[in-house]
Image (cartoon, rainbow, N blue to C red):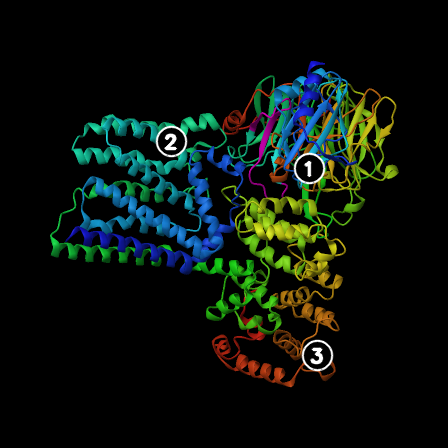
Amino acid sequence: MKRRTHAIIGWTTTVSLGLLFWFFFAVCYRHHGHYQEQMQLFLFTPAYFLELIGRPGGLAIYLGRFFTQFFYDSFTGGFLVALLLVALQRLVRDAANQVTRLPSAQLLTCIPSLLYAAVLCDENMLLNGLVALVGAMAAVAVYNRIGRPAARAVYYLLMVPVSYFLWGVGALVFVLLPPLTECIRRRRWTFLLTLLLPGILLFAALPFLAKAVYMQYPIERYLLAGDYYRFVHAYPVAFLSVFLFTALLPLLYRVLPRRRYAAARMQYASQLLLLALLAALGVWRVADWKKEELMAYDYYARVQKWNSILAMADKKAPTGPLTVAMLNLALSRTDHLPEYMFTYYQNGTEGLIPSFAKDHLQPLMVGEIYYWLGLINTAQRFAFDAMETIPDYQKSVRAVKRLAETNLINGRYAVAAKYLSLLENTLYYRSWAKQTRTYLANEARINAHPEWGTLRSYRPGEDFFFSETEKDQMFGLLFQQNPSNRMAYEYLLAFTLLKKDLPAFYRYYPLGEGTITYGMIPRAYREALALIWSQVNYDPARKPHGLSDRAVGRLENYRGIFTTQSDPASALKRTHGDSYWFYFHFGTN
Amino acid sequence: MLLLLLLCGLLACGGPQEVEVCEQFPPIYPDYTEVTIPSNIAPLNFLLRNKPSQVEVSIKGKTTGLLLRSDYKVQFQGRRWRKVLEAEKGGTLQVLVKAKVDGRWIQYAPFSWHIAEERIDPYLSYRLIEPGYEVWNALQLRERHLESFAERVIADNNLTDRSCMNCHTYTKNDPSLSFFHLRGKDGGTILNRNGELRKLDTRVAGMLSSAVYGELHPSGRYGIFSSNVIIPEFHTLAEKRLEVYDNASEIYLYDFDARTVQTVAFPVSEGEKLRTFPVFSADGRSVYYCEAPYLPLPDSIQYLKYDLHRIAFDPDRRAFGTAVDTLYSANAMGGSVCHPKASPDGNFLLYTVADYGTFPIWHQETDLQLFDLRTGERDSLDRVNAPGSDTYHSWSSGSRWFVFASKRDDGIYGKPYFAYVDRQGRAHKPFVLPQRDPAHYDYTLKSYNIPELSTGPLSFDAGDIERIYRAGEAETFTRVEEP
């Protein structure tokens, strides 16, 4: 096969690979990117840069976070991840070419990129590791371009510590690859003693040296410098085998057979098949689509795309407490909660408003509900505590933005200004922060703001303590203090319905009379009222006001099936699965 | 004189020509206008909030001065700064700020820096923590050299399984006598005595909790601590944030030599009491503490108010007095007292007063009060207090300076402020701990907790704390009765 053809195939492979990665991370798996983006606060300030660069693996951390921030826009974020993966492929190809030129096997150089793309499917795997791998491979490429052996040796021994301090533990790739390449290419095994051994010894000593100098972290963090994984104290070390594989793959080229033109075509075909299999296996086995779904709900709630949540739920009804809670929030924000909540799967009261958990995502999501309810202090607490739970000690741009909002609504302008100052040093939140700053201390403007002004009016006027076990009481107090807070009223009733506490529902239902108006009684209320009325044998004197005969007729139909069928749950699921009655009898609360 | 001439010359040739005079102080942050400072403090770097393109600052004393041109951040050179302050000790510096704003030079009203005769203790320890609710992440105890910007970590929860650590407290500002509580499964109270670190398990059977609030005796032999059941609650009203109160509390005396602990037997009083915040007097012969009658909580939290009491203590016999003096009566005065701290010379007692409760850092109305133990007079420290919580205070060894954590800037993030108490016992306007970058407080998300002054650097660092944390079991105590 001619050299030009190989070159064309090479670049076609690279570009195709890049496009595939781009499509995957920007479209298919984009909410993982959004999740990553919100779990950091990348600042364009010298102090932020200096704080990171002073740590082993600091440049990898800095650049990893730099690239991650672009997932604010998943197309840009996905493009940059694809670019890094493609750069890795080209660098592996370059390293393999240094061992031996074997163009017919060049597709194999895609494997490390594919493996790393699979690694990145874990939401806790940060871009720092990929940056480190590319950085270490770039250092190898520079090594391979130094002509004089002595200069190469000096460069190598200098770059071992430098690579460790720039890229962290990923520098292992640089420690291994150049000396082994020398051994294989020149068939001189003395390099193992003169280059590799000092390199490994130096590399092994560096974490301990760093610990002695810095002292601030436990030794594990120096041994695994670079913070490639979000849980910096619970590292899945096995994934570092991808680094090892990347270092060793170019060396394999020495033993791969050379093929003639016809055989080369077969070789390309088999390599393509291998890559396709690997990619399919990655998507099937490694990608976590359940989490992607959760992150999608989270993202849409965060950016207030309520209709997108409803569209997702219409395609596939959510079942987890958090996803159901986001669906209920979307229904509430679009004024559909009492009408449609039981047309979707309901997960009890925890699916309406989950209890606080020490986690870095859950409180952010649940905090959205409290925010829209007008429990601004609670939304603030959830944002703050979520940020404090981020395992790698980062700050969250989303939490900081929420804190700026809650403090603005609460009239704590000085502290709001502090958070805005931080956001003004970010790329994507700068203009929002600058715009929001114009609201500081401007009571009239805040009060007139469609979101902040409304939420400000929803806040409790009289103090009470937050209670995780008495949420219905809190919703009731909120509504009592501001009867225009429709969401508080609907959450109060939804809470009682989900708790299957019909007496409480019946007690609270009249609270909305006169202030909360509906064209007709919403379905969930209608069905609950009919059920309550049925429990007093449809006593005409106790008929709920406005309850239609049709609703009663439907209930009777339901009761007929319930009492006559041997397996009423299956039968009713088909005919009345979207009713409150079905939830009442068969749902979990 | 020569320096003054040089200063005048510089001003004449390089300074702004057409200047508009403004009768207000410059909009500087931190607010260092009209403050009293010690001669050994690091440069009071500041910035101008209106972000002028150029700033000229001239500082004039009796015999010396400084001229600085910069952008909106004014950062003094350490050596020159120290020279000026040393030369002008006991005097006053006039600070004149001119700024180029929107192409026009403005000369602001000059302000003064009074340089006190008395130096402040040169080291400050504090805990850095995000002012959160229930969750903490990165916690550090740090030590700052006040004469420069040097700072070092003395304990870091990164190294101790992310366990919580409480604030570090000295006795008599002595760097070889201090303690802090290190929580977590391998934690304990870390006692630093004469350079030796010990890890103590302060909880014995029947106690409510491990040691919480307290202090070491000046002799170093004893420690007096409260044991508390602490409950956090979260307010929903915008102006309030967090309420932390004790459901139960009692006070214990620890003997570190004999490794014994005894319940402090207070004179019999009516009803169940909550007692907390015990500290020794300067001479170690009395204990100050706060006491409130038990109420059903949290419903009656607004009525939970602590008195300030004193009880005699005989260190030789490990025995407490039979009578209690009330220094602050919550019934009569209306507030609730927390964190009493006796000045090292024994003349003053500094404490905080909140409207109610026992956790003043989240009470915006919390203010400091100074009680003259010689005359019984109370000073409400109007020049020191500000809106936002002012609490967590400690004295300098000379009793002429104290430091406290104030949330005056934004209500959330505490910062160390230093106040001078002159010979007449009057406190002066406080100033915040200077930083190399004057924008530091704008960007930091850390709160400074329990700032404590000391005469020298501590002998341990974060590595020593990591070692003792992992060094196995903590020393235990045996319960004994009061002799």
Foreground label between 2 and 3: 2
Instruction: Give the vertical position of B114 relative to A303 (above or below).
Output: above
CA separation, marks 2 and 3? Answer: 77 Å
> Alpha-carbon distance for marks 2 and 1?
51 Å
Residue B153 is inside the magenta segment: yes
Q: Nearer the viewer, residue B329 or A420?
A: A420
Q: Could you say where residue A46 lies in the image, as x and y percent from the top left?
A: 53, 37
Q: Are the residues tagged 2 and 3 within 8 Å (C-beta)?
A: no
Report the residue marked by disc 3: A544
- Does the magenta segment cover residue A519? no
Q: Earlier in the sequence, mark 2 or mark 3?
A: 2
* Mark 2 secondary-structure assignment: helix
Residue holding disc 1: B228
- The foreground one among B265 and A464 is A464
Circle 2 packing at 10 Å, graded few (<14), some (14-19), many (20+), is some
Name which residue lies at 16% across and 57% down: A265
Circles 2 and 1: CB distance less than 8 Å?
no
As drawn, A562 above or below B483: below
